Image: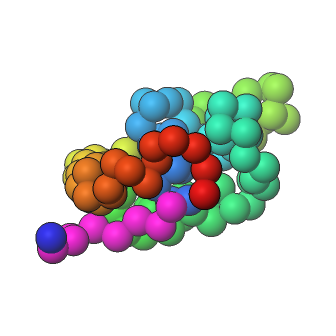
Amino acid sequence: MERRYYLGEFEETVLLVVAIQHDAAYGLSITNVIEEELGRSVNMSSVHTALYRLEEKGYVRSDLGGASEKRGGRRKRIFVITSAGKAALLEAKTSRQYLWSRVPGFLFEGGSS
């Protein structure tokens, strides 16, 4: 199985959240989803680092949103998944499903070992 796209586990998680939040994803919103919905402790700088790596790879693009008084006039950087990002996610999903299909069923039957 030839891989054309490369995503680390955390990059994949961040990219999935960007896709889920379609046109409304920004650093804090992504951090909140990862912490609250996945129960994973993460700091915002890690999320931003992953977002910028994803942008360099062409998997997301970003634009500045409107300024708000709540943010002291600062604008949010909004991230949107690209077609290359969608392809990377689909490839990652296919690869994981393929590997899971190869795990012998008896490994998960009848308790822990």
- Side of 29 relative to 88 (left or right): right
Residue closest to the far front: 110
Magenta stretch: dominant secondary structure: loop
Q: Quadrant of residue 6?
A: bottom left
Residue 73's x, y, as percent?
78, 35
Q: Nearer the viewer, residue 101 or 111?
A: 111
Question: Can you tell which quarter of the image residue 95 is in?
Answer: bottom left
Q: Nearer the viewer, residue 61 or 103?
A: 103
Residue 72's x, y, as percent?
84, 35
Query: Going 45% across and 31% down the picture, which residue do you hit?
Result: 20
Q: Is residue 6 magenta?
A: yes
- Give me the residue at 78% from left, 55% from top: 43
Quadrant position of the C terminus in the picture: bottom right
Residue 12 visible in the displayed image: yes
* Residue 88 appears left or right of 32: left
In the rendered image, the vertical position of residue 96 relative to residue 28, given as above or below: below
> Residue 103's quadrant in the figure?
bottom left
In the image, is residue 24 above or below residue 103? above
Q: Which residues are magenta?
A: 2-9
Q: Position of residue 15 (x, y in %)?
A: 46, 49
Nearer-the-camera pick, 41 or 64: 41
Q: Is residue 29 visible?
A: no
Image quadrant containing the N terminus: bottom left
In depth, the one of 62 and 29 nearer the eye is 29
User: Farthest residue toward the left?
Assistant: 1
